[in-house]
Amino acid sequence: MRPILILLFLFLFSSCETLEITNSWRISPLPGVGMKRILVMGFTREADRTVIVEMERHFQEDLRARGYEAVSAQQEYGPKAFDELTESEALNRFQRSGFDAVLTIVLLDKEKERHYVPGQVLYTPYGYYYGRFWGYRSVMFQRIYEPGYYVTDTRCFWESNLYSLQTSDRVQALLFSAQSRSFEPDNASSFGHQYAKSIIERMVKQGVLNTGSSPVH
């Protein structure tokens, strides 16, 4: 593969993992009672479940590293455990399990974008090849204009909300919300790590989560 095409490939590959938080919000003032046990729950179509599973897993690991008892809903209950439950039944289940907050992950939308990639002029400087016909022919053949082409990327729009489940006047209160966009992930685990890290860092920055790093035993 020609060097310039390798660089283009690496650029496009790295772009696919890019995540941008476009908006975030937190309740003010924050509730005085701290959170300890957090359920991480993703909602998605079956086709995108692999990514959601990885997102939940990375949120669980990163939150535990900060001292929270985080639990992945996919791992703990399975993908459809709450589909047929009423609100009161789901809340009772949360309460029995000791959760005092739930962090949701939702793929809001997908949108296809078409981009034009311009052609490249490949140039090889003068060298030893010049005195041999086939060497000269080979190099000159590569010094051609490569036509541009169109590529279609899929952009994903995500939302994560943190709700309090504590028994108070703010039960089920929305504490934090963030919307993000990314290209469709090529690697579910890599993107799950990036997404969880970005959202958690934003929650820490806004004072929603603590800055501790002692894991829960």
Image (tube, rainbow, N blue to C red):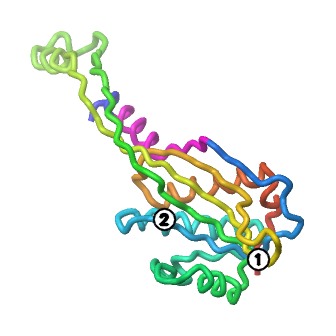
When the figure is inspected, residue 170 is found, relative to residue 201, above or below; the finding is: below
**Secondary structure that dominates the magenta span:** helix
- Quarter holding residue 66: bottom right
> In the rendered image of this protein, does residue 106 appear above or below residue 144?
below
Residue at x 75% of width, y 52% of height? 26
Residue 216 - label: 1
Q: Work out whether mark 1 precedes mark 2 in sequence or the reverse, and give the earlier one.
A: 2
Would you say 7 lies left or right of 200 here?
Answer: left
Q: How far from the left and from the top, in percent, is residue 51?
A: 45, 62
Image depth: mark 1 or mark 2 in front:
2
Q: Which residues are magenta?
A: 6-22
Magenta highlight on residue 86: no
Amino acid type of the residue tagged 2 in the rendering? Ile
Instruction: Please state which amino acid type lies under the numbered disc 1.
Output: Val
Label 1: which secondary element: loop
Number of other residues with Cα within 10 Å of mark 2, as a class: few under 14, some 14 to 19, many 20 or more = many
Q: Is residue 94 above or below residue 175?
A: below
Q: Nearer the viewer, residue 41 or 141?
A: 41
In the image, 156 versus 174, the foreground residue is 174
The residue wearing badge 2 is: 52
